[in-house]
Every structure is written in C-alpha cells, then in structure tokens.
Image (cartoon, grey):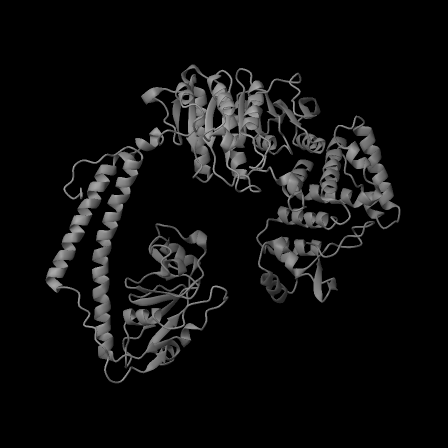
Amino acid sequence: MPTDLPDASSRSLRPLLTSMSEIATLARVKRPVVSTWRRRYPDFPAPVSENMSRPLFDGAQVVEWLIASGLGNVAAPELRSELALFGIVALRDRFMPWQLVEALGSLLCLRRLDGRPLVEDSETSASHEANADRALWSAVMHRAARIDAEDEFVLRELRSFDATAAPLARLAEDLIESAYDERGAYEWLLAARSRLGLDSLAADAVTPELRSLLTQLTDLRARLERGESLTLADPHARAGDLLAALLDDTEDRDRVTVLAADPDDRLTRITRRRFLLAGVSELDLDVQTGSDLEERFADPDIVVTQLPYRPGEDRSVLAALTELERVAYLLRPGCTALVLGPADALVDELKSTEAAQLRSALLRENIVESVIALPGGVLPFRPGYRPALWTLTRGPVPAAEGKVLLADISSEQLTPGVRMRLAEDVLLWRAEGFRGLDGHDPRYGRVVPVAELDRAFGGPLAPPAPPASAIWSDKVTERPALIAEAEARLERATADTRTYENERGPYRGAVMRRVGRVPGRTTLGKLITTRRVSRFPGHRIDEKHITRDGHHTVLGPEEITGERTVGDRRIDRLLLATAYERAALTEPGDVVYTLAPRLGVYVDHDGFSVVAFPARVLRVNADATRPLSPRVLAALLGAARGTARSPSAVRPARRIEDYQLPDLDPDEVLRFDALLAETERRERLLRAQSDALVEARRLTIAGLADGTLTLGEARTINRT
C-alpha cells in the first residue's frame, strides 16, 4: 500500500506517494507494464522522491495521467476512489480500522444531514497554518452537536476523536468527489472493508450473485411499481448488506420503511447511517440494538435475513430452527420472508427428534413457500459453509396450500440465467401455486405435499426426483431416438472398419530393427537455416473477436495441446480482414506448434486457419533437396528428447530450434509418412465407433438415472 503517509496537519503539502508496484495495483496491470509506460511515454509523471532507491510518484499526478491517457484497466471514477482508499489505508497506523470506518461514515452522514461540504474553501486555503486542523475539527463538532443532538447517527463517533482526525474530513470530501454523492462514497468504503483490515465486518458478506437472487425473489421493484408502500425488515442485520441490496434495486425509497436489529451497537449505528445515506427518511427508519425489531413502528412486508453464523463444531441445528421460528412470528398476511441459514438445519436429514419436530411444525403451519439448497462459496469468507434458503409466506394462494416447492441448485453456478429461472419458479409458485398440467413446471425443483414430508419425519428436504420440466423437456423425450441414432452410427462405423480391413488387410507397419548406419542428427534450427522448413509467427487475437460460428478456425495452445476441440473457436473473415490486416492464414499441411504451457504439435491438413500467439507455424518446403513431410516433422518434434518442462521452471529447458531430429533419407520419409497416414485413417474409424458408443452409453445412463428410460430384453446383454 502507499509507501509514504500524509502529514497529519496538511494533506496538500505532502502528496500521497506511490511506488511503481502500487501504480500497477492501482491500474490493474502487471508490474513491468509500468516500466514500459515510463520508458515509452515522455509525459509520464516524474518521481518526486525515493525510498531505498525506489522511485516514488505523486499518486494524484499518476491518476490524472492514467485518466488522460486511457491506459490501464480501471475506469476514471474508480481510479480516483482507489487513490482515496490509498490515502485511507495510509492512516491505518494512526487510526484503527474500526475508527476509520466509523469516523468516515459519520463524516459522510454529517455532510448529508447538514447539506454543506465538510471543508470550506477558506479552510482548504489556510491548511498550512498550525491551527488549521483544530479549527476544522472544532467546526465539524459544532455542526454535529447542532444537527445530531440526540446522538442517533454521528455525534458519539466524532466525539471520540480530536483534531488529529481532521485529515479524515478532507478524505471524506475526496471520496464524495470520486463517488458523486455521500451514499456512493459510503457504499464504496464498506465494500473495501476487508482491504482496510476489517475481516470481522466482512465475514458475513455474501456474493453479489446471491444478493441479486435474493432481490429477485422479493419482487420488490414490481411491488413498488404497483404503488405499494413497503416495510423491509432484517432482525439479524449486521452491517445491513441484504437490505442495502434491496434498496439498490429501486429508486422509490420515499415509499420504503426499514426495520433492522443487531446485538452489536457499533453495527446498528453503521446500518443506521447506511440507510439514511441510501435515501430512507429518518421518520421511516428504525434500527434497534438487540435481537428484536420495533414492530410497533410498522408491520414488515418483506423480511430478508441471514441467520447468525456459528462454526460447525458449535453449530446447533435446534438453535438455527428456533431463529427461523422467530422470523416466522414476524409474518402477517401478505408478508414474505427470505431466510438464509445453514443447510444442515434447513435441508439436511435431522438426527435430533426435537429439531425434527420443530421443522415439521413449521412445515405444517402452511407458511413455508420454498426450500432451496444453494451452491457453496456464496459466502466468500466461509467457502466450506453450506447454505440454504427458506422463503416464507403468510397466507399463500389456495392452490399452494399444503404444498412446498423443493429446489436444489447446489451444483449450479449462480449465473444470470440460473437466477432468473429460479426466481421465476418461486414467484410463479407464490402467485399461482400448483395448477396441474396447465401450470408452470419448475425448472429447478418439485412441488411436494407437506403431508408427504411429515411422514418422512426428519428426512432431507430435497426434491424427490428431477424437475418435471427436465423430465418432459424435448432433450429428454428425444433420448430414445438419439440413442437409436448413436447405435446406427456405431453399426455404420463398425461396417466401415470391416470394409477397410477387408480391402487393406490387417494393420502391418513393417517395422524392423535397423542394421547398419544410424541416421545423422540435425536440429530444427538447421532445417530452418537451410530452408527445408520455414517458420511463421502467430497472431495476437482479441478474445472478444472469437466466436463459435466464424469462417476461420482459430488454432491456439488450447487446441494444439488437446485441451479444446479444434473448431470450437472461430473468427469471422470480414472481422479478420479489417481488424487484423497482416494476419495470414495457414496452408494445408502446415505444422502448428506451441511451447506454452507445454509442447504441442498439430498438423493442419485443411489449412485456412488463424494461428493465435503464442502458437507458431512450421511449413515444410516440398522443393528442398531432402524434403520432409508435415506428418513426419510433427511426429519427430513430438518425440524429441528433452522437451518436457520442470514444474517449477518458468521457461522450457531448451529452445525449439535446438530440438534434435534424425535426418532421415527421402525414401524413408516417404515410407514413414505413408505409415502415419495409415494410422490416422484407422484411428478415425476407431474413433467414430468409440464416439458413437460413448454417446449411446451416456444417454442411456442419464435416462435410467432420472427415471425416464427403462431397458427391454436385448440379445447383446451378457446374463452370465
């Protein structure tokens, strides 16, 4: 982080100094890129000092240069925010991380309540005077005492500081300038809490994908657009992340009331400031310290909460279900609750009779709308934690009474498509319930009667079978035809192989022990020097220009080493002609090779492909005195000694020009090429059989696994 700390009395006299490594972090580039910028661009900011022979730069000058030049991988507003964060982190040895977050949050909130900047122009110009910080902080405290006399938002935190915190007021103004308003500055500050060292404050944070899913499941925006006024509640608010995600999804905050509670007084004040800055009126905001919401303030319409985390060794399934029951007590008719908690309590099989009785009682109460097993990793600080989600509704539609939607997306990634389909499942179930054959079939779950779950007392709340939409999808109903087609392909491939063997006879390579002179050795470098082989570079192709339906195949290291199927990546010919004017296509028979991540060799028999760097091309000269063939060259390169790379090595053991190859006689090259061509033809025939057999096997297993297929009598089944 920043190497030099700004002076306590004046930020303007001592610029924020950054090293070249920190500039690389700021611009999100590799460290050598900054050296290249210094060498290539004369207007790159000059160093202002040195630290142990390392040049140090004015961070503000660097940011302005990055914005003006357009270099780096960070947008202009984010660059300024990052520079402000550097300034905040530079104060960590003077203030504790908690103090930084509380003080800056309070200053931002004070600015919003007062409606005036924290630092006036006169104070900025007089910052060189010794008493400037005392005067500035005195003015800040006077404003805080006047505006927050009841100490609801800022007064307590600011009173714990003295004039040494005056630089924080200037940093708060920098944050606002970068984020355009106080709310954006505060959200950005809280997003950087782990970088400030506040891991305890970030430990319960969920991924943006899960926050988006929870927002979709509440259907908040649609309800506000219908003119409803809503009360949002979270009895375990922590820093208010979940409710803040809901507020991010709407601009109609004048019709939103917020209730929240948390046992930690520090967190409740952070949450209170957060929602005030988010646009919730003071009269529509109540954040309590403790475990109970102030229900007399308003009746909740939407409850979104995360049950308090406990380590697996100390976790009590019964305690988690008891907390879930407390959330259920908050529901009134029409209220929806989303409860995130541990999967071992919410969906797994229960060993405790008391816990099983409590979960069954909640299910019988006719308030459980859906139970969803979520993928792991949605709590980044707790990757081993298995979460699940319950959605509760008081007074469901008649068609949903006595039933619950069970869904399992634990093996899925929370992509936009998965989130949209799951939200549609739950929202349609909430609005319409079960409608039989003419209804919406859930894509990720099954509708199960509560009575059936009650009979399986304490059993897992998992879908009993694949979703109906999956079973009756076109992909599934077409399986018998697809299997028959694969079996037909297998039969044709087997017949083609037999025909070929009848015509050509069994495979015989006519290989024998060499007697007499051993062929001389040469290197690829000598073959290139004597023009028996020519080498051509690959081209740097932008990934965004690569598609699946272009005109030219793209051959890169993935295709050459077999990690990706040849033909999966293609590029449009018009785009190639306009964006890559110097790009040349391969010719039939070109040998494409790569050394990274390991040696790979591929013969492009069809040609007209684009070779992507770091792959390169070798082209055999057929008019040479001792010509090679592409197949022979590729085979000899692939078998060259000393081509493997040590796992810890950064570079290959030797250059490809130094690879030693036998210098075969022309007639031996011809026989070797014919043998390689014969093995390729037979390999294609066998691969066609293997591919057809694998496809038939895969489809059969999938159909038997989900119960959509069965087996009849077959003569080929060995009953012994």
Q: Position of residue 682 (x, y in %)?
A: 20, 61
Please say if 91 is above or below 157: below
- In the image, 453 versus 465, the foreground residue is 453
- In the image, 333 versus 15, the foreground residue is 333
Q: Position of residue 58 (x, y in %)?
A: 72, 57
Q: Which residue is located at x 66 percent, y 46 percent?
A: 81
Q: From this viewpoint, is residue 601 visible?
A: yes
Taking the view exactly as shown, the residue that stands out farthest to the left is 502
Total label count? 0
Please tell me in which quadrant of the rendered image residue 553 appears.
Answer: bottom left
Please say if 261 is above or below 513: above
Quarter of the image for the N terminus: give it: bottom right
Q: From this viewpoint, is residue 475 visible?
A: no
Residue 706 falls left or right of residue 281: left
Residue 557 falls left or right of residue 4: left
Taking the view exactly as shown, the residue that stands out farthest to the bottom is 517
Q: Position of residue 270 (x, y in %)?
A: 69, 33
Q: Which residue is located at x 49 percent, y 16 percent?
A: 365
Please tell me in which quadrant of the rendered image residue 588 appears.
Answer: bottom left
Q: Position of residue 148 (x, y in %)?
A: 79, 28
Please say if 485 is above or below 360: below
Quarter of the image for the C terminus: give it: top left
Residue 692 falls left or right of residue 654: left
